[in-house]
Image: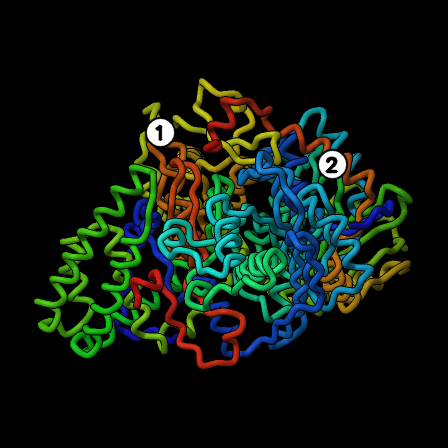
Amino acid sequence: MQQADVFNVSSNELTALLKRVFEAMGCDQSALEDAAYSIVAAESRGFPTLDTLPKILERLQGEKPAPASGVDKNTDWLEINGNCSSVACYGSVFADLAAAYVKRVNKCVFVRVRSCHERLMILHALLSNAASGVPMLAYWNRQSPPDQWCAYLASSEPAADQYLEYTLSDKTSSPDCLNLIAAPEFEQILPHWQQIQAQSKQQKAISAAEIQHRFELSISNGIPIQRSLWEHLQQIALNVLVPSSERSRAGAGA
Amino acid sequence: MNANSDMQWRPAQEVMQLDRLGSFHASRLSFMRTLLRRVMNEQWQITPSVFDLDSNGYGSVVYRIQAAHGVYSFVVFSNYLEPDNRNDRVIAEQWDLTMTLCEGEVSEEYLAVLRENVPKQEAGRMDSKALVLSRANRSARNFDYVVDCLAKGEQPDVDKLVKVGYLYRTTAVYGSGKFGLADWQKVLTSLPDFAAPFAAEMFTCYMLREFSVVQAQHIATARAPDAAVDLNDELRRYLGIGNSTGLGMAPYLIHHPLLIAKWIETRETALAAILSVPDEVVEKLNQLIGLLKQSDQHFKEVFVDDEWQASKNKTLSVDLKTLLNFLSDQGPRFRNWSDLLEVVDDQVGLDAQELLRALLLELYPDIVDPLADDMTVFEDYRLDSSMPVKHAIALIEQHYQWALNTDFEQTDERYLFWYRSEEKSEPRLGVRGEDDGEELQMPLGIALAVQQVHQNLLNWHEITVASEKERVLAEFLLDKPEYRSVLRRVLTLCGQRYGDIHANILNKDLMPVHLLRCKLAFFGVSKFDPRSRLWLRNTMYQGAPLLKEIGKPYADDWYFPVAPSAAG
């Protein structure tokens, strides 16, 4: 209906298209579903991830690494080698591991995923686990500018969700990792969030109310997307379609 | 509703069999019935606000709808269509009518935008003010005939309307965010008038039914202003809307198992509640016999070419006689419906068994109607990643025996594959090893996927069983993340009373029309008329009240309608 460079799509429509796009890139059913849900979950809360989609797709054109199996525990942190995988595709696997361990030990669990991409895409996995009763926070450094960090806190009460962008006052945190902290109760995770706040110089904070407002706006009006990107995605998605023929039309009852 | 301890639900292994689902009938829980209860009881005000048709019926019409919680507009565009271009398939690109249902009033400016986009359907672009996008084609057998009759001052022959009970046949009704339309979540959370499954889509079809007759009368009057008459109300009520449903509906049932399971559970809950009512068989027996007689007449007025469906209908007809005789002779000796069903189920086929259950729902509106508000579900497929692997294996073995028992070494069990064609992404069926597209098949083979994940879980469990701690799904999935999707699905559904449909839809003998009929029965359609095993025609809203009857007492008794003369 709009002819502008940017127009709105529904989250259903975007999810469906993204699934086809990731399918066309050769992702398996689990990875393509999680990737689509991850992008839509972030976009519908006003966290721009579509901008990074061309880069994700470029990476997927080559090898599609899955996270390495096995978990190391040398410190308080469980360490996973992300094997250069995409958090969009495998973030739920990492977060679910943290949630499972929380249920096993009934206390805070710390998981560090080394070597992984698109770490903002962890949002969907955080929200999903929080809704299942395991509040979780994630923090990671941005690649550009490299000294900037982001953190998201998700709880079963969306009114408690928060997002931060900050610079660290100390340099002890591990860069290029996705850090997850999960807890059995919100009260147990809150001190970790407060510690992040205390040790950092806050650049930007987005409150739960703002996140909720953005989400409601997306549901009501749709999610904005560049027409050129939309058309590019449509083109990629064509690769999951099979050329038609008289014989194939018979397979539709014609 | 509160379940009582006497309630007994039918087991999933009985209800979720595909041939039984393909024998479901419309009921008072069907979405058309539910919607019209709301429209009639809440007395929605529906009037044309723009009526701009030429003498041939081409142009545009806007209806303003004042519903209980808001204002909406039904907008229809009528354009000339070459008869040779009239095609019911999804791949068509032109139609007689195109339409949309929008939030709020439609300004002239917005109408111009709609006029630019709605007739293009999939090739146009909608926005989030619009809830539904649809199109329809004239019935080649009926439309001109009815217009001719009315222009001559005559009423059409009932026998012709019995053969084809509509003037228009809709070929697609899109909602849920497609092509820029409003997201389902928006409808669910902020538009309570349509916050029920497919309510906006069903309402669009109801408005199309109204418009179809208005347009026919308009053309007849323009042609013969002095002679033309309006269609009489009895015939008008008997006319519904045709619908053509293809293979595209089948993947929906596989992609939305939680929703389908919810619909079925609601229906089965209503039945279980009715079967637990004591001592009412005698009291309600005559009413049930009356309903069966009406149904019998209804099915006598169903004409199909398809041999398989004709045979199914013939069996139903015989079974209805059996049922009527049995109920007349033996009915009074039963104290509750449960005992009665147990006896009659042994004497009749699936169609009659399910018809009898659909009719039982008619006897208990107080039990059934409140349940209609409980047909929506938030489709959230979740995985408890802390579940021990051996527990997941046990659950799969408990709930998916039907899948695990399928022998995929047999070529017939993997004979078919599903794919999307480049022609409007239309889902199609191919034969493995013969047709192109196998490498792009859709992941609809749930039974096969369940077997694969089950075997992998067993293998993984065997390797890790010696470890000191019990291994959980999160660890399995770190090793084998490709099974996350199917595990999320099956473990969510294991928590439901009715889960996945118990069918391997890759099997050579699959009847996809069973899947279509299951969903269409929940919509509330009747007169299933398969044109092959892959698609079918049916009729919507035959017998339903007219717009002009809003405000009058509403009996909600338009199920299994019969032709006016037969009823008379």
Residue B549, compared with residue A215, is above or below; it is: below
Find the residue positioned furthest to the front: B226
Which chain's residue wears label 2? A
Residue B540 lies, in percent from the top left, at 45, 56
Q: In which quarter of the image is the N terminus of chain B?
A: bottom left
Instruction: Point out which mark residue A217 bears.
Output: none
- The residue where tag 2 is placed is A233
Q: SS class of the residue under badge 1?
A: loop
- Residue A183 placement, left or right of A234: left
Residue B82 lies, in percent from the top left, at 62, 38
The residue lying at 25 percent from left, 61 percent from top is B356
The residue lying at 41 percent from left, 67 percent from top is B234
Residue A207, compared with residue B405, is above or below; it is: below
The residue lying at 69 percent from left, 55 percent from top is B54
Instruction: Point out which mark residue B508 bears.
Output: 1
The type of colouring in the image is rainbow
The residue lying at 9 percent from left, 67 percent from top is B330
Q: Do the residues labelled 2 and 1 touch (CB within 8 Å)?
A: no
Which chain's residue wears label 1? B
Amino acid bearing label 2: Leu
Taking depth in this image into account, of B151 and A251 the one nearest to the observer is: B151
Observer able to see residue A79: no
Residue A46 lies, in percent from the top left, at 79, 56
Residue B146, compared with residue A235, is above or below; it is: below
Taking depth in this image into account, of A190 and B349 the one nearest to the observer is: B349
- Residue A28 placement, left or right of A41: left
Amino acid bearing label 1: Lys
Total numbered badges shown on the rendered structure = 2
